[in-house]
């Protein structure tokens, strides 16, 4: 049985003090969660939020990590810097990073290998654009992102994959539960062929893209969907808690 994992992705929202207030509001609402609960927060919020999360069942995540150990990479954050504050998870290859910051499957791969080596759990994002879906290229695009972004990983069960169709992110347009389930099934099959079928069975794959309190139950009822990466709805405590408590 795969344990579901619900992760918030705050993106560029919440100052450190706003972030602390938010996690303080979330914590009591999710304390009986049966899934893993994570908040991925802006790097500068990490010290304060890390402190505020002490004694809670909420894991801390970052939104990116650099692949080098240290050095001349102005503006970047290393795995060791994250680890010092108790960060456990890190989002890698979000479509916004691919679209606006030149992230490629190659850099996704490098960041993922570095994160695993440092003992962080990468949440690696993959997904197709609307044009790619409409022209029947979804599987081809995902297979390339998987083959190039996840190569040379020793133990694929050390990562989490987030399947996020780009057309569903922040648009209010969710993939139907069946669409998401079918595509995640394809991702699992591809991972099984690339690594091993047993590893693919153990690997957690989230859905992301306009997941909210209203649609989470239907999505989470699907056999292939092991959780969610939540953007907009993770910024309000009751909404995020309702998703975390999807099974209550
Ligand atoms: P959204 O974002 O829930 O606001 O669509 C999801 C994400 O980008 O991770």
Image (cartoon, rainbow, N blue to C red):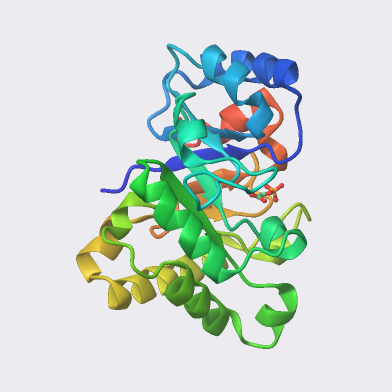
Q: Residue furthest bottom?
A: 135
Is 227 or 58 nearer to us in this picture?
58
Number of marks in the image? 0
Q: Residue furthest front?
A: 72
Left or right of 38? Residue 215 is right
Seen in the picture, residue 100 relative to 59 is either above or below; the reply is below
Q: Does the image show residue 167? A: yes
Seen in the picture, residue 212 relative to 178 is either above or below; the reply is above
Is 173 or 135 nearer to us in this picture?
135
Q: Does the image show residue 225? A: no
Query: Residue at horizontal 51%, vertical 79%?
Result: 144
State the image coordinates of residue 111 (x, y, percent, origin top left): 49, 55
Q: Quadrant of residue 180?
A: bottom right
State the image coordinates of residue 103 (x, y, percent, origin top left): 64, 63
Query: Residue at horizontal 35%, vertical 74%?
Result: 189
Is 88 or 178 nearer to us in this picture?
88
Seen in the picture, residue 201 relative to 33 is either above or below; the reply is below
State the image coordinates of residue 28 (x, y, percent, origin top left): 53, 13
Left or right of 60? Residue 213 is right
Query: Residue at horizontal 45%, vertical 25%?
Result: 86
Seen in the picture, residue 165 relative to 247 is either above or below; the reply is below
Quarter placement of the C terminus: top left
State the image coordinates of residue 26 (x, y, percent, origin top left): 59, 20
Query: Residue at horizontal 53%, vertical 84%?
Result: 140
């Amino acid at each position: 049985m795969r344990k579901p994992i619900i992760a918030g992705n705050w993106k560029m929202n919440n100052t450190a003090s706003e972030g602390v207030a938010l996690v303080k509001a979330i914590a009591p609402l999710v304390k009986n969660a049966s899934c893993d609960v994570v908040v991925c927060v802006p790097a500068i919020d990490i010290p304060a939020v890390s402190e505020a999360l002490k004694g809670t069942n909420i894991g801390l995540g970052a939104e990116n990590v650099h692949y080098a150990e240290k050095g001349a990479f102005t503006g970047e954050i290393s795995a060791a810097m994250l680890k010092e504050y108790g960060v456990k998870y890190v989002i890698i290859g979000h479509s916004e990073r691919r679209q606006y910051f030149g992230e490629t499957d190659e850099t996704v791969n490098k960041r993922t290998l570095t994160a695993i080596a440092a003992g962080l759990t990468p949440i690696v994002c993959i997904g197709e654009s609307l044009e790619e879906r409409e022209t029947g290229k979804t599987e081809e695009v995902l297979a390339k992102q998987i083959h190039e972004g996840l190569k040379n990983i020793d133990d694929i069960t050390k990562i989490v994959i987030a399947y996020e169709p780009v057309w569903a992110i922040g648009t209010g347009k969710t993939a139907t539960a069946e669409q998401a389930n079918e595509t995640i099934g394809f991702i699992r099959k591809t991972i099984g062929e690339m690594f091993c079928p047993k590893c693919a069975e153990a690997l957690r794959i989230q859905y992301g893209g306009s997941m909210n309190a209203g649609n989470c139950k239907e999505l989470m009822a699907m056999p292939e969907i092991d959780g969610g990466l939540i953007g907009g709805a993770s910024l309000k405590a009751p909404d995020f808690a309702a998703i975390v408590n999807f099974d209550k």
